């Protein structure tokens, strides 16, 4: 098995970063992570973030930046993350108003294309990070996510396939990564358990809470990599075939009675145990 460089999506340890930014990054480096993917800088300047990550030997590979933030100041956003050493910036999430079928997806495609051009001009590559809602069939029979990738040229937009959400959507994540061979430089490794049907309120777990409680029989939980339902070795083999460059551990919410930092450490230890 190829030994991939492994990064941590820092949303996984967001509360720790808010309390102790530098100390948390130091612990992430000590866990054996090679790099990080940001989701906000917690009030730190680009210069401070660069100093800390350089000192710790953590490669800043990418950042999740809300679409509206990129639209408001694309030049500023891309310059900031380029200065940190990022090769990529990712669209992390679409509000319902911009999603395929239920929203103005035409506007989304146009906006993503325009941002991808600006990112390329800045020396970056735009990624799109999926959830499960993009796996809805368009009129032409194509999934919304595939439609986006079909309509925005591959030299402008690459994939950041979140293997958890692909699986939740009922699609084989390993096969889906392979489908985008040559266009899957960064892949999210995320494990989960879903004992029953897909819960109606599962997005509360990623901070989008509509106030309703999840029913016990619909229990869903994210898990450290290697401790859930994902066929992780199949996914890693697919990443190798697809030519992926970085694998990113993400766990939106802790589980198993562990803290977010303990979950991150457990994921890294599992990947090390299988030679990755």
Image (cartoon, rainbow, N blue to C red):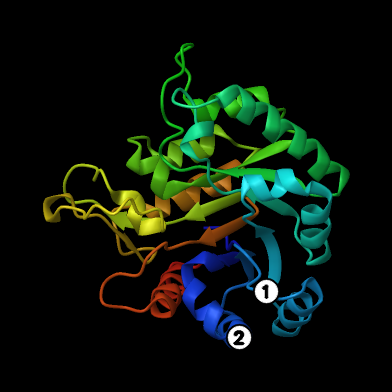
- For mark 1, what is the residue? 43
The relative height of residue 178 versus residue 194 in the rendered view (above or below) is above
The relative height of residue 206 versus residue 102 in the rendered view (above or below) is below
Extreme residue toward the top, this view:
140
- For mark 2, what is the residue? 26
Q: Residues within 10 Å of mark 1 (few under 14, many from 20)?
A: few
Label 2, secondary structure: give it.
helix
Front residue of 66/180: it is 66
Q: Let me know if residue 185 appears in the view.
A: no
The relative height of residue 107 versus residue 160 in the rendered view (above or below) is above
Q: Residues within 10 Å of mark 2 (few under 14, many from 20)?
A: some
Where residue 220 sits, quadrant-wise, is bottom left
The spot of residue 15 in percent (x, y) is 48, 76
Residue sitting at x 63%, y 73%: 42
Label 1, secondary structure: give it.
loop
- Estimate the spatial distance between the alpha carbons at disc 2 and disc 1, rounded to whole Å: 18 Å
Residue sitting at x 40%, y 49%: 164
Front residue of 47/237: it is 47
Q: Let me know if residue 170 appears in the view.
A: yes
The spot of residue 257 in percent (x, y) is 26, 77
Residue sitting at x 61%, y 85%: 26
- In the rendered structure, the answer to whether residue 218 lies left or right of residue 79 reads left
The relative height of residue 77 versus residue 115 in the rendered view (above or below) is below
């Amino acid at each position: 098995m190829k030994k991939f460089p492994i990064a941590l999506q820092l949303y996984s340890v967001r509360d720790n970063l808010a309390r102790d930014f530098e100390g948390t990054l130091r612990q992430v480096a000590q866990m054996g992570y090679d790099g990080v993917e940001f989701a906000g800088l917690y009030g730190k300047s680009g210069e401070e973030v660069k100093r800390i990550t350089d000192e710790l030997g953590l490669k800043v590979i990418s950042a999740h930046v809300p679409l509206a933030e990129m639209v408001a100041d694309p030049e500023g956003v891309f310059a900031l993350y380029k200065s940190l050493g990022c090769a990529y910036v990712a669209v992390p999430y679409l509000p319902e108003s911009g999603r395929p079928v239920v929203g103005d997806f035409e506007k989304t495609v146009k906006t993503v294309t325009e941002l991808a051009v600006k990112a390329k001009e800045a020396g970056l590559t735009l990624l799109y990070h999926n959830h499960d809602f993009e796996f809805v069939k368009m009129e032409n029979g194509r999934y919304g996510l595939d439609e986006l990738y079909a309509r925005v040229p591959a030299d402008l937009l690459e994939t950041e396939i979140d293997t958890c959400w692909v699986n939740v959507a009922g699609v084989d994540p390993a096969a889906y990564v392979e489908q985008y061979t040559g266009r899957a430089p960064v892949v999210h490794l995320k494990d989960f358990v879903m004992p029953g049907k897909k819960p109606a309120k599962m997005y509360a777990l990623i901070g989008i809470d509509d106030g309703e409680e999840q029913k016990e029989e619909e229990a869903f939980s994210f898990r450290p990599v290697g401790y859930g339902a994902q066929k992780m070795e199949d996914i890693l083999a697919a990443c190798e075939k697809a030519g992926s460059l970085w694998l990113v551990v993400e766990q939106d919410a802790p589980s198993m009675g562990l803290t977010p930092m303990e979950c991150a450490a457990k994921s890294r230890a599992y990947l090390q145990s299988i030679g990755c």
